[in-house]
Amino acid sequence: MYSRSSTALIKYVVLRSIMLIITIFVAYSVSFLLIKLMPLDAVEYIVSQYITSPAAQYQDPEVINSLKTGLHEIFGIGGSLFDQYRSFLIRLLRFDFGPSITAFPTSVSELLRNAIPWTVGLLSVTTIVSWIIGNILGVFVGYSKMQSSGTRILFAIALVLRPMPYYILALILIFLFVYLIPVFPLPGGGVITYEFNLATIVSMLYRLLLPALSLVIINIFGWWFLSSYSLTLNIINEDYYHYGELRGLKRYTLMRKYVLKNIMLPQVTTLGLSLGGIFGGSLITESIFALPGLGTLLYRSIMTGDIITALGVLTLSILAVSLATFILDIIYPFIDPRVRTR
C-alpha cells in the first residue's frame, strides 16, 4: 500500500508529465505553422538556380516541374498542409528530420551535432559562471548595504552595464583584445573543422574565450547581480530576519539560513530556464564573433527558406526548455516547503 504522501507525489509527477507532452505538442505545432507561413521557399530557390544555369537552357518545362515535385517529395514537404504536418510529426517522434534542403545531402541531425558544441559549450559555461558570481556579488552588496567604496563601485558598474546593448560591449572587447592588444584571434579567422580531437577542442576553446568573457561580464552585472541585490534588500527588511537578529544569531547564520535560502528559490528557477533556452542559440553573439552555432544555423535556414533545418533547431529548443521546466517542477517541492505542503 502506498502512503498518502507517495500517492500525492505520483499524482504530481504524472500531472506534470502530461503537461510536458501537451506543451511540446502545442509548441511544435505553432512552430510548424509559423515556419510554413514564411514567404521563402528553398525548393523554389534551388529550381531557380538550376533554371539560370547553362545546363537547363534546353530543358522541357515538364522536366522542371518534375524536378520541383521530386524535391518536394525528397524533403517531405509535398502534399497538403496536414500531410506535411503529419510527416514532420513522425520525424519528431523519431528525432530524424531528414536531409537539409540547402545543405543537401547533409542531414539536419548532422548539422545540429556540428553546431551544438559551439552553442552549448559557450552558453552553458557562461550562464553557470555568471549565475554564481552575479548572485554572490549581489548578495554581498545588498547585505552590506553599500557601506564600503568597493560595493558602491560594483553597484555603479552594474548600473552602467545593465542598460548597455550587448553588441556594444562585444565590439569594445574586440577592439581592445583583437586590434589594440592582439590577444585573441580575429572573429571568423581560421578554418572551422568538425573533427573533434584534442587540437580542435583547444582551438575551439581559444576562439570561445573572448565571446565567453563578453557574455560573462554582461550577465554578471545584469539580471543576476541586480535581482539578487534586490532580493537581499527585501529579505533583510522582513520581520523574520529582524527576529533572527533579536535572537542573537550570527551574521553568517543569518546570511546562510535566512538570506541565501530564500534567494535561491527564484534564482534556481531562472537558471534552469536559462540553461534550457541555450539550445536556441545566441544569434548576436554568434554573428559578431562568427561562430557556427545554433543561432547562426537557425538564422541561415530561415533566410533561405530551409524549413526542415529551421524546424530541427526550434524543436531542439522546445524540447530543452520544456524538459528544463519539467525538471524544475519535479525538484521544486524538495527545495521549497511551501510547494511541498500544497
Image (cartoon, rainbow, N blue to C red):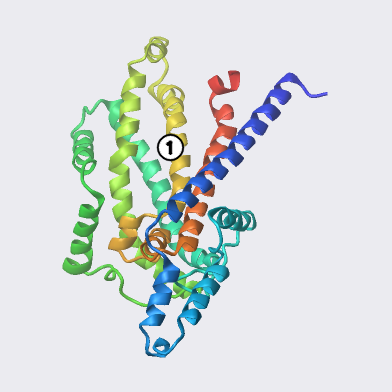
Q: Nearer the viewer, residue 291 or 251?
A: 291
In the orientation shown, which residue stands out farthest toward the right? 1
Question: Helix, strand, or loop for circle 1?
Answer: helix
Residue 310: x %, y % from top left? 45, 59
Residue 211: x %, y % from top left? 32, 59
Rendered view: 304 above or below 126:
below
Residue 203: x %, y % from top left? 40, 71
67 relative to 5 in the view: left or right: left
Q: Is residue 84 visible?
A: yes
In the orientation shown, which residue stands out farthest toward the left? 180
**Tag 1 residue:** 270
> What's the amino acid at mark 1?
Thr
204 relative to 337 in the view: left or right: left
Q: Nearer the viewer, residue 267 or 116?
A: 116
- Residue in the picture at 36% in, 65% down: 291
The crowd level at tag 1 (other Cα within 10 Å; few <14, some 14-19, many 20+) is: some
Residue 18: x %, y % from top left? 63, 36
Which corner quadrant holds the N terminus? Answer: top right
- Residue in the picture at 41% in, 63% down: 305
Asked where in the image residue 42 lies, by quadrant, the reply is bottom left
Question: Disc count in the image?
Answer: 1
